[in-house]
Structures are given as C-alpha cells and as structure tokens.
Amino acid sequence: MTVVETIEVLSPVLQGSSSSFLSTGTIIALTGFFALLCACIVIGHLLEENLWANESIISLVLGLCSGLVVLLVTKFENSHILTFSEDLFFLYLLPPIIFNAGFQVKKKQFFKNFTTIFLFGVFGTMISFCIISLAIGAILSATDSVCTLQVLSQDETPLLYSIVFGEGVVNDATSIVLFNAVQTLNFSDIDILTALKLLGTFLYLFFTSTALGIAAGLISAFIIKTLYFGRHSTDREVALMMLMAYLSYMLAELFNLSGILTIFFCGIVMSHYTWHNVTESSRITTKHAFATISFIAETFLFLYVGMDALDIEKWKESKASAGTSLAVSSTLLALVLVGRAAFVFPIANITNLMKKRENTKIEFRQQFIIWWAGLMRGAVTIALSYNQFASSDDTSMQDSALMITCTIIVVLFSTVVFGSITKPLIGAVLLRHAKPTISDATDLPSQEDLNILFLESGDSSEQTNNPPTRKNSLRLLISNPTYTVHYWWRKFDDKCMRPVFGGRGFVPFVPSSPTGARDETS
C-alpha cells in the first residue's frame, strides 16, 4: 500500500473527533481511578501511625465509597469505573507485586525457613483445600497476607516475616495450580491414582516453574555482565531487567506453568546476581522503581476489589435474601477458619520437633500470628471465583451469582475486620525487641556463619602449636545443617557462579560514573 493510499484510508478517522482514538468515557474512568490512587497514598500517609488502619484497608474502603457514588449517580444501574478483568489482574497487576517480593526478600532468611514455608504453602493449602471442599477449596485457599506484612518487620521478627511472606507466595501459586487441576478432574471417578496424578502434576509445575525463573534471572545477569550496558546507557540496564522479569512470567503462562513461582524466583536470582552487575545509579533506580510499581499495583488491586464488591448486576442475579447470603458467607468463613487451623498448628509443631535450637522453633504466639495472617482473602480469591462461576455451565446463573457475591463478602469482611485488628493484635501477642540491622538487597553473613567458616578453615591450627579439635563436615552438618549448607553454597557460588554471572563485588567499570571504579564493598 502506498503512502497516498494509506492517507486516503486514514483520512476519515483523522477528520473525526478525538473520541475515535480515546473515548471520553475511558478518559473519565482513568482520571477518576488515578485521582483515587493519589487519595489512597495521601490518606495512607496521614494514617501511617493509626492503630486500626493500613493502606490496604484504606484502598478497599475508598473503592467501596467510590463504587457507592457511581451507584447513586447511575441510579443503581452501574457501580464500576473499571470492570473487573482476570486478564488485567493476572497479566498486569500481579507480576510486579510478586517480582518485587522476590527481589526485596532477605534470601538467607527465606531459604533458611524454606522447609517450613514449603510445608505451610503446599501441604497446608492442600489440607485447607480438602476441608473447605474440592468444589470451592482452591478458591478460598488463596490467602492474602498483605495486611499482616505491612505490620510485621523483617528486622524485628525475621523468622515470622519470612514464614508469613514465603507462605503467601507459595500459597497463591499452589491455589492456582490446584484450581486448574481440579477443573480437569472427574469427581465421579476419584481414586488413589487420581490423587497421585494431581500430586505429580503439582510437583512438575512447581519445579519447572522455579527452574524457568532461575534461568531467566541467570540469563539477564550474564547478558548485563558481559555486554556492559552501563557504558552507554543505564536506562538499557533497567529496561532489560524489567523486560526479562516480565518475559519469564509470560513464558510460564505460555507453557501453562505457574507464573507466580517463575517471576518470584526470577526476582530472587536477579537480586543476587543481576542487581550487582549494573551501575550504581541503576541499582538505586531499580530498587525504588520495582518497589514503587509494586506499591501502585497493590493499591490499584484493593481499589478494584472495593468497587467490584458493589457490582449491582451480580447481586440482582443471585436473587438471594439477606439471610441466605449471610448464612452461606458465614459457612464459608467458618470453613476458612477451621481449614487454616487444621494445618498451621500441627505443621508448626512438627517442624519444631525437627529443630534442636530453641531460637529457631516457632512459638505458640507466632503460630497464632501465622494462622491469623492467612485468614484474609484478596484479589486472587475473587479472580478465581469469577473464573469458576462467571462462565460455569454446571451451575445455574443464580447459584453462580450467589457464590460470587458470598466470596466477595468473605473477602471484604476478612480484609476490613481481620485486617484492622491485625496491628493491635500483633502488638499484644508479640513481644517486640527491635534490633538495628543493615537492610539491602543481599544478606550479610551472620555470626554463626563466621563461626562455621572459622571451624572449616585451618587458620587457627596453623597459628598454634596445639590446634583445637575441629568438627568434621558430617558432625557439623548434623549439628548446624542450615548454616553448613549455606556455607557450602557460598563456596560454590564464589567459585563457579559469580565468575560467570557476576554478583556481589562485581561492578563494571564505567568512565562516566561518579566513582569511576569498581565497588568492592557492595
């Protein structure tokens, strides 16, 4: 097609009004939503020290209020500024939240408690899934611990934070995998083979999704380390990190894997290798940019959920009385409470039996906070509920609408009521002893790591005539398994991985940078 022909085709459009490209309704909707986002940030700042409020609750309440305003303006015909969309949630809002979680996590604490996290996030979700029932178990098994994490501190309560945080990520991935698996089950013919097949499918998805995330992170580290993007443009470094992370998520979805697990482990690998390969200015930019995007996405989600709760069409379609809706919602909420208690306390005590040191065991008050943190339900629950019931052929439109509205009631009640109690509850249950620590994208070795390093080295025996008796590797592994594994991983990492993929201590020489030299202390 020639240029003249192209102009002739486009001329009717060009001569039309600007609404042909962007409708007035879209502009109004986006303007209103951005104004609400700004209001959430301002009000959240003003109520930062409030005992009963946090940003997620504020965003949810503002969403409800704005939805009510829209209802009144439209004379109870519509409550949406934007319509809830699974694609918007799973493709655009969830990835930056999960990636930043992996990028900012204190890796040593996370992997030190990985066994406990895995038991809570996987087996605990399966137990809850079975108790709540196969039909809706996967939907209501998806926890939302954002309210609790906004109150807990990585520095003051590292063990509790890492368990609650890690379980939340693994739980979301498990719930989505279980949900997809249940869709293919034939409930009239369930046997042991079916259960084993379900377990095998989950393990396959878990390990392949994790491997894909690790591979994406390592590839980004290798490319940035090898090509020295910072010589020409730090913008390219930042852009490549963002795009590689998002690409890993999309590849996981393309291959029907767990995008949550993929992008989470991609974030962990990038923080360990890629982040140290970029220039100093890019480090500052990426750390704050990822956190900012994640914060906006979380705020957006809670606003979204608040507005969608007043979807008048769903309430009309359900045709259920207030008593029926209350009874169904109360039953679902009770099942959530029982289903979570059924695995949190037993699994916590089982893991305590496997730990010898008292300071690594999960006390009862900590178990209670872990149980409480998982009671709240959020956007993942609503998204799965829409996926299950909005287009279901197995249930009537009335029953589907009832289940969606009852799920929304559970999400609202758990987030607003349980979330508002969380801060004073944690203050009353936990005895906080703040300890100043250095916060960074990487973790510094602990005193116990240095002690093990001293035991493993022969420096002391070379400097004394009567060397102390050294523990052999097997005895050390039995007495300090976590720290010993961490020590050997550090040796392997320094010798094999960092020479190829970079990492702490590696900063490319950039003549235009303020330092103009390598930063060996990063």
Image (spheres, rainbow, N blue to C red):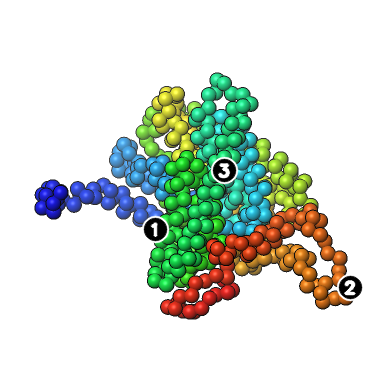
Q: Position of residue 407 (x, y in %)?
A: 49, 36
Label 1: few (<14), some (14–19) or many (≥20) C-alpha neighbours in 10 Å: some
**Amino acid type of the residue that numbered disc 3 sits on in the rendered structure:** Phe
**Amino acid type of the residue that numbered disc 1 sits on in the rendered structure:** Cys
Label 2: few (<14), some (14–19) or many (≥20) C-alpha neighbours in 10 Å: few
Which of the two labelled residues, at mark 1 and mark 3, occupies the earlier sequence position?
A: 1
- Secondary structure state at the residue bearing disc 3: helix
Identify residue for label 3: 206
| Mark linked to residue 438 | none
Q: Image check: 415 left or right of 427? A: left
**Amino acid type of the residue that numbered disc 2 sits on in the rendered structure:** Asn
From mark 1 to mark 3, how far is it between C-alphas?
38 Å
Identify residue for label 1: 38
Q: In front: mark 2 or mark 1?
A: 2
- Secondary structure state at the residue bearing disc 2: loop
The residue positioned 43% from the left and 28% from the top of the image is 392
The residue positioned 57% from the left and 40% from the top of the image is 204
The residue positioned 43% from the left and 47% from the top of the image is 250
Give the vertical position of 439 relative to 416 (above or below): below
Q: Image check: 223 left or right of 20? A: right
Q: Image check: 120 left or right of 381? A: right
Give the vertical position of 320 relative to 46 (above or below): above
Q: Position of residue 355 (x, y in %)?
A: 76, 50
| Mark linked to residue 466 | 2
